Image (spheres, rainbow, N blue to C red):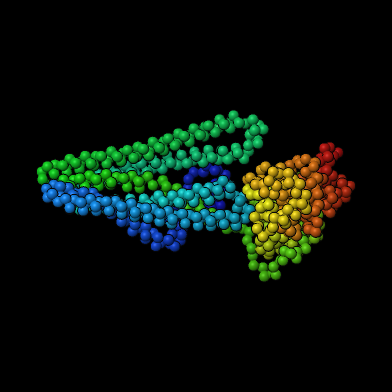
Amino acid sequence: MRPAQAIHNWQADQKADPNMPEQKPQYVSAFRALSGYIKPHIWAFVGVFFCTLIAILSDLLQPFLMKIAIDDNLMAGKNDYRGLLIICAVYLGLSVSSFAFTYVQNNLLQHIGQSIVSRIRKQLFGHIMKQSMRYFDRMSSGSLITHVSSDTEALNQFFNQVLLSLFRDGLTLIFIIVMMFQLDTTLALYCLILLPIIAIIAIAFRSFMRATYQLARTRLSRMVAFVAENLSGMNLVQVFHQQKEQQKQFNERNGLYFKANLREIRTNVLFGRTFDILSNLSIALVTWIGGNAVLGQNLEFGVLYAFITYIRQFFQPINTITQQWNTLQSATVAVTRIWTVFESKPDVTDRESGRPALTPEKVKGRIDFDRISFSYEEGVPIIRELDLHIRPGELIGVVGTTGAGKSSLISLLCRFYDVLDGRVRIDGTDVRDIPQAELHRVVGLVQQEPYLYSGSIVDNVRMFDESISREEVIEACKFVGADAIIQRLKQGYDTHLSERGSGLSAGERQMISFARIIVFKPKVLILDEASANLDSQTEQLIQNALHVVSRNRTTIVIAHRLSTIMQADRIIVMSRGEIVEQGSHHQLLERGGHYRELYEHSQGHVAV
Ligand SMILES: Nc1ncnc2c1ncn2[C@@H]1O[C@H](COP(=O)(O)OP(=O)(O)OP(=O)(O)O)[C@@H](O)[C@H]1O
C-alpha cells in the first residue's frame, strides 16, 4: 500500500470511528521526526545532563558521607569533633547542591520541552489552516482538536516526565550499582541476584499497565465524544425529550470509565507495593548477610548502613521508569499522529501561471463556468458539463432541489475545490491561476450560517483587521441597515459575541456578514442564503441589505426563499448538477417548468 493511501485510510478510519484503537507506537520514526526540533536546544540538553549528574552525585554521596562519619569517626572512638562538623557541613552542602541543580535542571528541561511543543503546536495549526476543504471533509474536527491539544500535551509530558526520568533515574541506577560495588562486592552481588526478578515483574506489569491505561483512555474518549455529540445536538435532544435516555447512556459510559479508572489505579498501586516488598526483601537479605558480616568483624557498620540506604534508593528509579512507560507510549503515538498531519499536502495550491496577476481593485466581475465537471468522490458526478456565463454586475439567483449542486458550484468559484474538467474564470483568468489570497479578496462569501468569532461586533465586521477603522465599520453597518439592530444591543458595537455568534438571531448574524462585505469591498459577492425561516421584518431587512450590497458587484444568490431572488437579473434552475432552466422570474413562470413547480410549492400549493 502506498504511504499516501495508508494515511488516507487511517484518516478515514479515524473520522468513521472516534473510538479507534490506539495506533502502534513507531519509536524510531517518532524520534527521528523529533530530532530536528531537539537540535537547536542541544546546548541546553548538555546543561541538563550536567545539572542532573551533579544533583545525582550530591544525593548519592550523602550515604557515603554517613559511612565515613560512622566508621572513621564514631566507631573509631577518635572524639574528632572538628572532623564530624566538617562531615555535617559537607552533608548540608550536598543537600543544597542537590536542591539547586535539580531546580536548574527541571527549569531548563521544562523550558526546552515547552519551547519545542509550542513551536510544533504553532506549525501544526498553521499547517491545518493551509489544508484544502477535501482534507476537512475527511478529518473530523474532534480529531484535529485532539492533535493540537492533547497530542502536543502528550509530547510535553514526554520531555518533562519521560526524558527527565530516563536521564535522572537511569543515571541514578548506574551510580548506585557503582557505589554498591565500591563499598562491598559480595553484598552488591547478593543485591543483583534480585535484578532478574525485578526485570520479570516490571515486564509483566508493563503490558498489564498498558492494557488498563488504554482501556481507561478509550472509555474516556467515548464519554467525551458522547458529550460533544449531545452538546451540538442539544436542541434535538430537548425537542424529542431525549434527556432521560441520553442521561442513561451517559451514565453507562461514565460507569465504564469509572471502572476502568479504578482498575488502572489498582494496577498502579499493586505495582508500587510489589516493588516495596521487593525492596524490603532486599533490605532483610542485606541486613541478615551484612549483619552477620558486621558481627563477625568482616564488615564495617557504616558500610552496612550505606548499603541499606542505597537499596532504598535503588528501587525508586526502577519504579519511576516503569511508570513512565505509558507516557512514553502515548507520546510516541502522539508524535506519529502529529506527523501524519504534517505529511498531508493541500490539493488546492497556488500555481505559477506566468500570467499577469489580477488586481482586485480593477476586477470587473465577469464570471465564466466553462463546461465544468466536478465530483467529491471518484465516479459520483456532482456537476456535469455545466456552462454558465455571468456579466459584470449581474445579480444571479440560483435555485434547485436539495442536493442539486448549488453550493458545490459556489465552492468551485471560491476554489475550495478544483474542477475535474473545464474552467472557472474571473475576468477571463482561470481561478487556478489567481493566488488564493487574491481570489478571496475578489470573491466575498456570505454563508448560510455566517461564522462569527468570539469578539466584539466591530472586530467581527472588520475581521480583526485593525487597519479598518471603527467609523468605517459603523458606516458599513448603517449602509446595510444593521445599525438599528446593533444599537438595540446593550453595549452596541462593543457587544461581545460568544462562540459562533450565539446571542444573535440568524437574520442578525447575516446582517453583520453583509456589513463585512461592504468593508472588504469584494467585486464578486456570493450569498448562500439561510434556509431558516426569518420573520417578515428581518426578511425585509435582508432584502434591503442585499439590494445595497449587490450594487456595482456581480452577485450570486443561492436562494431557498424564492422571494429573495424574484428581482434577480437572471435565475438559474439546477437539477442533478446541470442547469435545466434559466431566465427572469416572469419568463420562468410562464415557461411552466421546474421553476414554476418550485414557486408553487413555495406558495403552498402543488402544481398540477
Ligand atoms: N463535502 C462533500 N463531500 C461529499 N459529498 C458532498 C459534499 N458536499 C456535498 N456533497 C454532495 O454533493 C451533492 C450536492 O451538494 P450541494 O451542497 O452542492 O447541493 P445543494 O444544491 O447546495 O443542496 P442544498 O440546497 O441542500 O444546500 C449532494 O449529493 C451532497 O450530498
* Camera-nearest residue between 67 and 539: 67
Q: Position of residue 273 (x, y in %)?
A: 32, 38
Left or right of 44 on screen, residue 415:
right
Residue occupying the point 17% across, 44% down:
290
Q: Measuring from the top left, give residue 584's x and y in whole percent.
A: 85, 51
Observer able to see residue 440 = no
Q: Residue at x 56, y 30 (%)?
A: 248
Q: Residue at x 56, y 38 (%)?
A: 226
Query: Where is residue 583 shown, x and y percent of the image?
Result: 85, 52
Which residue appears farthest toward the top when viewing the image? Answer: 244
**Number of dots carrying numbers:** 0
Q: Position of residue 340 (x, y in %)?
A: 52, 54
Residue in front for this viewpoint, 394 or 65: 65
- Horizontally, residue 455 falls left or right of residue 223, namely right
Q: Residue furthest left?
A: 296
Tell me what residue is drawn at x 63 percent, y 38 percent.
233
Above or below for 592 versus 422: above
Q: In the displayed structure, does residue 88 sit left or right of residue 3?
A: left
Location of the C terminus by quadrant is top right
Residue 604 visible within the image:
yes
Q: Nearer the viewer, residue 375 or 416?
A: 416
